[in-house]
Each structure stands twice: as C-alpha cells, then as structure tokens.
Image (spheres, rainbow, N blue to C red):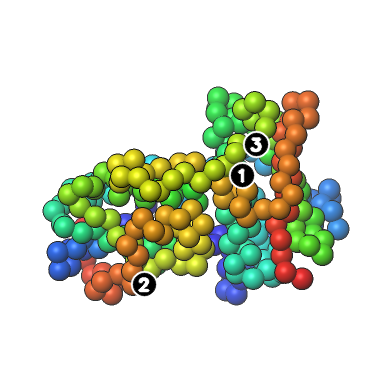
C-alpha cells in the first residue's frame, strides 16, 4: 500500500496513493494509519485526491481512523474525487468530517 | 474507477456465449481478486454508455454486492462461485447475481437503514453502510433463495 506523509504547519498530511480504498485493503489501511499517526500532530489531514473509489469497507476504515485519533486529534479529509464524495454524501458522513477541497501544502515532498 | 474511459486499451469484457444481446455474463470465484476482475470487465462493457456518475454508481453497487457475498455467503471460506448477468434495456441495466453460498439471514434482504451519525465520535458507525447504498442506488431490488442458490436482482437506472 502506498501512503506518504508529511508534517506541515502543525498538521500531518497523509496522502493515500492508491486508486481504490476497498474491502481488499481496508484493514491494511487502518494498520498503516496507526503507525503513521504515531508521530505527534494536532491535526491529521487525509488526502484522498488519488483515490477514485471508496466502498463501505473503506468508508468504515476512515471512520475507524477518526475514532482512534479522537479525542486528542482530529481527522480531516481533502481532495475527494466525485465517486468518493458521493459515498460520503449518501451515507451523510460528509457532515461528520471537515472536508477540504485540497490538501494543505500542495505536493508532498518527503516520504516517511 | 477500475477502468479508464479515455486512456489506453480497455480490458476485454468477458462476454460469454450466455450473455444476453447487448449484455454481459460472467462466472467467477467468490474471492476478492476474482471479484475485482469481474467488476473491471463489467464496467468496461458498459462504460461508454454511461456518464461518469452512473459508472461510479455501478461500480459501487456491484462492489458492495460482491463484498457481501464473499464476506457473508461464503463466510466459512469454502470455495464458491458467483454468476453475474447484466442486460441492457431502455431503463438501464438489469443485473442478476447468483451465488451458491449461505442464504441471507432469515431468508430476506437486510433492512439497510442508515446508521445514525448524530452520536459521539467514539460511537460513530464503522459498518452498516453497504445495504443502505445498494438499496439507495438501485431500483426493483429483489432476492430469492432458489434451492441452494441466492438470486439477487436489481436495476441500475441509466439515462437513455
């Protein structure tokens, strides 16, 4: 699974560089997010701009990341592609997350 | 999405001799890898007849249905088979999915109510979205247990 992260102005920006976040990789995604977010940061921004497809398992995995970061830290989302945005809207999970059009900092420069 | 409508070669759809005219038919193993391949082939077959939004809906609905079959109908891990038949008519795509796994609980489709999100963060739902999405995005959804097979049918509306 390709995930890259960078600390930027108090936020940890995590970009999931996979075309799909689905049942096949949902558990692996949760585990990797636990490892990556072990480093301190007030906010965690998950950049989904490379992800064209999220199914209910992927959605559940993102919710679970939000839950294990709480209450100390917040998970925010950025760069939702149309089908992914639709899944969040239909399930009303768009009201649970702060969603940004774009991730802060643009291009991520360092892999961790 | 699994297939790109513009760039490169489209994967060949596995249109078998049993495919209805203008339609699609495939039989594949009930595992994650085979299911992805079938999803890719079915999308490739119809992607040029749909908007991006309709293609996204088709991918989502079929992915949720297949996930449910792999995770629940074959929860014991036994080898299983899924048969997907799609026919095109003026109202959209009529989809028929058969599998030889365990029947639905109580022999009927799950209610698929959207879990509430008006709860504390620690109580947010991590599941229960699948059947909500299937029910929300399909029409004429029906399920029957036919002998040792589950038969699920629904229509995916597509603009003419």
Foreground residue, A79 or B117? B117
Check the residue under mark 2 and report the chain it is in: A
Q: Position of residue B10 (x, y in %)?
A: 64, 66
Furthest toward the front, the residue is B118
SS category of the residue bearing label 2: loop
Dividing the image into 4 quarters, which one contains the N terminus of chain B?
bottom right
What residue sits right under mark 1 in the picture? Answer: B65
What residue sits right under mark 2 in the picture? Answer: A101
Give the spatial CA distance, label 2 vs label 3.
Answer: 37 Å
Q: Position of residue A28 (x, y in %)?
A: 36, 44
How many numbered discs? 3
Foreground residue, B81 or A13? A13
Dividing the image into 4 quarters, which one contains the C terminus of chain B?
bottom right
Q: Which quarter of the picture shows residue B116? A: top left
Q: Residues within 10 Å of mark 3 (few under 14, many from 20)?
A: some
Q: Are marks 1 and 3 on the same chain?
A: yes
Mark 1 vs 3, N-terminal side:
1
Foreground residue, A17 or A61? A61
What residue sits right under mark 3 in the picture? Answer: B109
Q: Are marks 2 and 1 on the same chain?
A: no
> Which labelled disc corresponds to residue B75?
none
Q: Position of residue B59 (x, y in %)?
A: 60, 56
Check the residue under mark 1 and report the chain it is in: B
Residue occupying the point 76% across, 53% down: B94
Give the spatial CA distance, label 1 vs label 3.
Answer: 11 Å
């Amino acid at each position: 699974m390709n995930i890259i992260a960078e600390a930027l102005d108090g936020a940890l920006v995590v970009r999931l560089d996979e075309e799909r976040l689905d049942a096949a990789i949902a558990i692996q995604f949760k585990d990797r997010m636990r490892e990556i977010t072990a480093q301190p940061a007030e906010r965690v921004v998950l950049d989904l701009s490379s992800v064209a497809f999220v199914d209910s398992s992927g959605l559940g995995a993102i919710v679970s990341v939000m839950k294990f970061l709480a209450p100390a830290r917040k998970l925010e989302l950025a760069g939702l592609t149309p089908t992914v945005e639709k899944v969040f809207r239909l399930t009303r999970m768009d009201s649970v997350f702060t969603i940004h059009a774009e991730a802060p900092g643009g291009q991520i420069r360092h892999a961790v | 999405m699994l297939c790109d409508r513009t760039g490169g070669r489209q994967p060949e759809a596995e249109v078998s001799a049993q495919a209805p005219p203008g339609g699609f038919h495939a039989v594949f193993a009930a595992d994650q890898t085979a299911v992805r391949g079938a999803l890719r082939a079915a999308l490739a077959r119809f992607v040029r007849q749909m908007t991006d939004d309709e293609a996204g809906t088709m991918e989502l609905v079929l992915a949720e249905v297949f996930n449910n079959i792999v995770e629940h109908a074959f929860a014991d891990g036994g080898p299983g088979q899924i048969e997907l038949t799609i026919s095109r008519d003026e109202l959209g795509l009529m989809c028929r999915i058969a599998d030889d796994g365990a029947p639905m609980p109580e022999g009927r489709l799950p209610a698929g109510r959207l879990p509430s999100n008006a709860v504390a963060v620690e109580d947010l739902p991590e599941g229960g979205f699948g059947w909500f999405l299937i029910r929300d995005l399909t029409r004429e959804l029906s399920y029957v247990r036919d002998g040792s097979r589950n038969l699920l049918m629904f229509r995916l509306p597509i603009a003419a």
